[in-house]
Image (cartoon, rainbow, N blue to C red):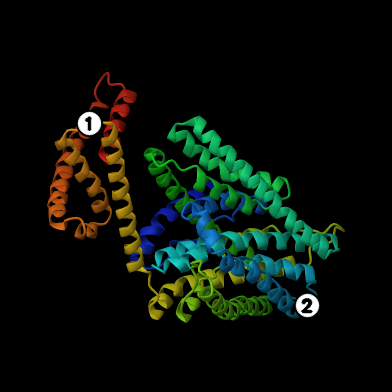
Amino acid sequence: MDQLALLFVLLLGALVSVPVGDRIGLPAPVLMTLLGIVLALLEFVPNVDVPPDLILPLLLPPLLYAAVRRTSWRQFAANVRPILLLAVALVFVTTVCVAAVAHAIVPGLPIAAAVALGALVAPPDPVAATAVAGQLGLPRRLVSILEGEGLFNDVTAIVLYHVAIAAAVSGSFSPWQAGLDLVLSAVVALAVGLALGWGAYKLMDLLGDPTLQIGLSLLVPYASYVMAEELHGSGVLAVLVTALFLAEYATDADDVMTRLAGHTFWDIVDTLVTGVAFGLVGLELHNAISTASGRWGEMLTWAGAIVGVVVLVRLLYLLPASWLAKRMHARRDVEEEIPMTWRETVVMWWSGMRGVASVALALAIPLETDAGSPFPDRDEIIFIAFGVIMATLVLQGLTLPWLVKRLGVESDSEQEKEFERTLAIRAAKAAKRRLREIEAVEELPDELSEQMLRRALEIGVRISPDLGEEERREAHEQRVRRLKRVRRIQGELLSAARHEVLAARSEPGADPEVVDRVLRHLDVRSLR
């Protein structure tokens, strides 16, 4: 098997793991990691030959962009405090604790190298957290916090990592310079992210065509990441800012085709790239095994100790942090999404899985220092890092569904239904207001006006069937049944038309482009 065949196996696994995971109740990223481990143990499977410095730029931008599309800037702004407690403060605390323990138990490990180890294992993986949490039906407030933590903690961890690596390579460290680098990295990332977001927004208006706009949306996160890194900024933060800007301002309510096609496209990208990323995590087991080379006892002891530190620090931090957040939350009018019970706090604790970013940072550790000597304890750091990644991702990923079920943590289904109902009412009222505005400037026949009013009311009923209770439910139910029947018959008519047009594609002299254009028209008509 060569590298290309291995890539196709991972892509196929990414697709298959989704329905298999749904059927057996396990998250797809965990299944892909297990597949990667199995492949890594097979002799005929080659070692992964991807330069470490390309793993993050290739995988992280589209994953971050896809994750941000599911949220909004206002959601981050409303929950900035709990997110900062996890994405910044907890990363610092975990880095310090891991560095202290690693420096104490690994003979001869310098402080700078220990800090690098702490930084690369400190951030829970954004993709693992959101993918796992999203499939378990957790309360929306927990998913929002996990998404925010996962998206922003890489910014803190990567900056700490680069500072520690620079100190280990050069042999010198300046706290003031490190702090300045952190601030400058954030400022550059914000500037690049906003500039590219604005530029992409204007360019999308110029392109017009949905296909070209979606193609641009794939290029934008890569451009944002690379440009920020070239200017010594945070590529991760730049991608987040760009994605949030586009999600906020580059959304046209009437651009239905672009929205539908873009949603489908990014779902596909998210599924494939996530699968490949976690498959690579498992495949990199080759490197961890090769670094042990007869030192399994002490290496496993070190890795186990660091796993314990990572897991324990998160628990000991979350318990008082959640209590403090609730106390402060009770004194504020702003609605924040925070863990409301100790059960939710435990689920948040066990959701701290490491993944793609930790793997990339571990493999990107330089081979030599500026003095030409080998990087101190590089093999030991890589082995410990992989021990933490495998233990948290596989062990926690496999047991998290059981833990959620055992603790009885469920989504706020009633609250979600109520919000959906509120949106349905707002949508129906907006449609009726617009109808009144049209009637004020156009003379509509009574029959047409009544028909349009019914259509306006049915907009809300289609979104939330319970809405009919306040809007003459019985009459609406009859109209909904009639509408469903009409739509079913219309669907069958359109299906017959599509089959006939598609059959014409194989006829002699048929122009495939004309056939496809007519078929596309019928497809769009079917969506209405």
Q: Amino acid at mark 1?
A: Glu
Q: Amino acid at mark 2?
A: Pro
Residue at x-position 59% and y-position 69%: 86
Identify residue for label 1.
Answer: 443
N-terminal of the two: label 2 or label 1? Answer: 2
Residue 443 rendering spot, x and y as whole percentages: 22, 31
Residue located farthest toward the front when viewing the structure as drawn:
440
Residue 168 rendering spot, x and y as whole percentages: 80, 64
Can you tell which mark lies on residue 335? none
Residue at x-position 50% and y-position 33%: 205
Up/down of 472 relative to 339, above or below = above
Up/down of 170 relative to 202, above or below = below
Residue 362 appears in the picture as rendered: no
**Separation of residues labelled 2 and 1 (CA atoms):** 87 Å
Residue at x-position 49% and y-position 51%: 66
Residue 50 rendering spot, x and y as whole percentages: 62, 51
Q: Compare residues 19 and 159 and report the one nearer the observer.
A: 159
Identify residue for label 2.
Answer: 107
For residue 333, side relative to residue 504 (left or right)? right
In the rendered image, the quadrant that contains the C terminus is top left
Residue 277 rendering spot, x and y as whole percentages: 53, 56
Up/down of 468 relative to 302, above or below = above
Label 2 packing within 10 angstroms: few (<14), some (14-19), many (20+): few
Residue 418 appears in the picture as rendered: yes
